[in-house]
Structures are given as C-alpha cells and as structure tokens.
Amino acid sequence: MQTRPESLLLNRRGLFSDAGGGFAGLALSQLLHRDAAEAGESHNHLHHPPKARRIIQLFMTGGASPMDTFDYKPELERLHGQMLGPKEKPDGFTAPAGAIMKSPFKFAQYGETGRWVSSVFPEQAKMIDEMAFLMAMTTKTNVHGPGTYMMNTGFLLPGFPCMGAWISYALGNLADNLPTFVVLPDAKGLPYNQRGCFSSGFLPAVHQGTVINATASQPVPDLFAQPAHQFAHQAGDAAGFSLLNRINQRHADAHPGDSRLDARIASYELAAKMQLSAPEAFDLSRESQSVQTSYGIGNPATEEFGRRCLLATRLVERGVRFVQVWSGPQGATDNWDNHNNIEKDLPPMAMSVDLPVTALLRDLKSRGLDKDTLVIWTTEFGRTPFAQGSVGRDHNGGSFVTWLWGAGIKSGATLGRSDDWGYQAVEKKTWCYDLHATILHLMGIDHERLTVRQNGIDRRLTDVHGHVIHEVLT
C-alpha cells in the first residue's frame, strides 16, 4: 500500500478547515479526494484492459434446485422411488436421504444450443443462447451460512471482504454521486449471515455494500430531515459542517494514519450528493409504463423482484459499479430452500424472478449497457436428487448451476457436467474461486495480484485457489 504524501495530507486538512460548511465544502472535499487519487492515494488495481465495468449479481437465497431448473436428468425418471442414496446422513443434510425423486416439472430444449430448461423458467428459456452456463459448480459445505459466505467472500467463516467490497477497493467508483457497491435485499428480509454477506471485512469500511430498501418510501433512510426537525435547514447544515470540519482536523492531527476518518468523511460527502441524485435514480415512475410492465411491475407475483431489477438497471446506468439483487430471505420459507414440497414451493419463487430477470437482460441490451455490464445468476449450493420426506429436497453442495451474461461472455457456452443424478459435479468442476477469478478478470483485475496484507498474510478474494474460466469468455 502506498504511503499518503504528507504535504498533500496537510494541504487537504487546511483546505477542509477553510472550506466552510454545506454543500460547497463537501464538493471541495470531493475534489480533494480526486486530487489525492491522482497523487497515488487511491487503490487502482487495473491490471489489463477490462471487458466489464459494472456488475449485477442475482443471488437465489436457499439453494436453487439444479435438476428442477437448468440441469435436466432423465435418469431420475428411470430410478424414481429407488433407495440409492447414502445410508448415513451426510454432514449438513437436515434428514436422512430418501428415495431417488424425479423432477415434477417438464423440460424442453430451447434455442440454437438446444439447452434443456425446466417449465418453471419459460421466460429465461427464451434468452438461453445469450447465456454461458457453469454446470458443475461445487462448494465445501451443505450449510446455508457457510455456503453463502463462501459464494460471496471465498471463505466459509465471517470476517472476510465480499466480492463487491474487493471490487470497490480495487477500482473505486464510476460516479461521484452514488455508492460504488449497492445491495438490494428481498423485501421479506436479509439473507443468511445478514449484513455479513455485504461486509468489507478487513478492508476499509467505505467499501462495504450500501443496503437499499427499494420498497420503502425512503429507500435510503435518514437521507433527508424529518419535517418535525425544523432546525435542519441549509444554514444549520453549514454551521454543523463547519464545526465538523474543525473536529475532523483535530482528530486527524491526533491520529495520523487512521483510515476510519477518511471513510466517515467519504460517507458524509456521498450522503450529501445523494440528496440530489438519489430521488431521480430511485424514482421508477420515470420509466415508461411499457418498461415497468416488462419487469412485471403491477403483477403481485413479480412486482417486488421486478422493481429491484429495474432499479439495478437504473443504478448501473448512472454509474454504480456493483449491484447485488437478492431473491429470498434467510429461513425455512419464502426462498429457494425447498425442503418440504419442491412441486409446490419452487414455482412461486421461480415465477417471482423469471420475467424480471429476462426483462433485465433485454433492457440492459436496449440501453447499450450489455457491452460493459456483466450479469451473474447463482445460489449458495444445490439440492439432493433424493427426496426429503416424500416430495422435498435437502441441501447439496455437490453440484449446482451458475450462469453469466453480458460483457466478455461467450454466448451459448457451457462448461462442466454433474453426474447422472445431479448429485456431484464430475467434469470440469468450478468453485467460487474460479467464478471470482473470472469476474475479476473481466473487470481488468488479476485475482492473484489483488492482495491486502492482513495479520501477516497476503489475503485475496480467491485465497490460494482459482483459475480464470476462459471456456466461457470471448
């Protein structure tokens, strides 16, 4: 990490003190941040020309079942009802393995690639030739919490930065008036591990995900003063910021090298800028009725996820670098964790995302954003080919599916294969490390060179693993 030039730091503090309060002082401080970046203060880890500049990640919380969505397994029909699973309950299973269970959903082939897709995804099936599929994703766990951490941070345990935080740290923002990394959780609740999935870990706190409640009347809480607080006006802001600048200067003098002050200042600056930019960015009514309808807005089944997908499109269009859209909260219901009845529980979840996801891809293309935007659809693990109870499916880290679309992705590509039951990945396995290495590569980052020294170890998103998956890249 490069040491901050002392002369620049002193000049910056002095200017902060002289700038006064209000938006003028905040705008000046942003210019100082930019000057500091040009002087070598920022972290720019661009190692080669990027093909993608922004990312939308769609995460299906709970473990989307591969053999009921994208991984067609006709052998399950032949073996249906036979007790062929493990005799002892594997770690992370919530019950002993039951009989082999065929998918209750019909599959058909779509597009020039002839990919098999389940009837639960009729809309995504129309876009299948534009996607690239990783059919043999695997993970180290059958437990939601560790599995969700691993797919987001590369580690099973808490305390590590997520991919969005690493990208924010490595590349910084594309726009000055919106966050670099935005999280749009399900309205029903946060995913497993709560905000740990969006954490900056040991990276500066400024790189953690900014959580936006897309369905709230104020998506960003406390961005504007409440009407009851009459003292909160422009003149009061100016006086408050002037005092804050003086306090900040004293703190900086007393604690040289403490990055938390800079992170706090940056968050205040961003909040001030968002007072101007956020109302326009979050106002979906500015989109035509046809666009809103295409995302499923107005249909109770697709309204909530559709609103967040449209918001994700508007945010990347305005310069947000990384947007994460979650489907499903933690817990035993209203997500992709279909233990009880796969035939009853999976279709509503699939319906809630199918049309919005398809609209997202088409809308990005219509706006010309497909040329530098990467879209990722994934989950923390798959599900068993064995029944849980009589018609449910248990957790299974052995094999699951991820697809990619957009900038730098080879349309129609496929890598890997699971066994004939969809239980274990058997050919061209890919791990979160490989997925993360590939995403960083598309962003212009060498995953082996993006490191931070922490507790005597050069940490990276991919730990000591990972290979770029060139087979699905252009």
Image (cartoon, helix red, strand yellow):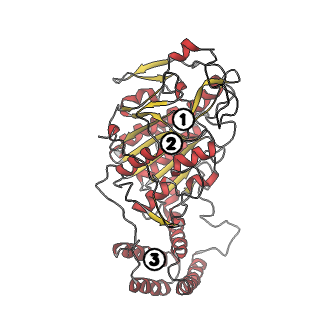
- Are the residues tagged 1 and 2 within 8 Å (C-beta)? yes
Can you identify the residue that label 3 sits on? 29
Q: Secondary structure at mark 3?
A: helix
Q: Position of residue 407 (x, y in %)?
A: 34, 44
Give coordinates of residue 423: x percent, y percent: 54, 27
**Residue 170 sits in which quadrant?**
bottom left
Q: Amino acid at mark 1?
A: Val
The amino acid sitting under disc 2 is Leu
Distance from label 3 to label 1 (Cα)?
41 Å
Of the image marks 1 and 2, the number of the one nearer the N terminus: 2
Q: Residue at x 58, y 31 (%)?
A: 383
Q: Quadrant of the N terminus?
A: bottom left
Tag 1 residue? 353
Q: Is 83 in front, or is 392?
A: 83
Q: Amino acid at mark 3?
A: Ser
Q: Nearer the viewer, residue 403 or 349?
A: 403
Q: Earlier in the sequence, mark 3 or mark 2?
A: 3
Q: Position of residue 132 (x, y in %)?
A: 38, 35
Residue drawn at point x = 64 percent, y = 34 percent: 337
State the SS at label 2: strand
Tell me if residue 289 comes above or below residue 264 in the rendering. Answer: above
At x 29% / y 56%, what residue is drawn?
48
Q: Which residue is mark 2?
A: 58
Work out which quarter of the rendered image holds the C terminus and state it.
top left
Residue sitting at the far top = 78
Real-space Cα separation, disc 3 to disc 2, in angstroms: 34 Å
Which one is earlier in the sequence, the residue at label 3 or at label 1?
3
* Helix, strand or loop at mark 1: helix
Where 323 sits versus 133, above or below? below
Residue 418, image x and y in percent?
47, 28
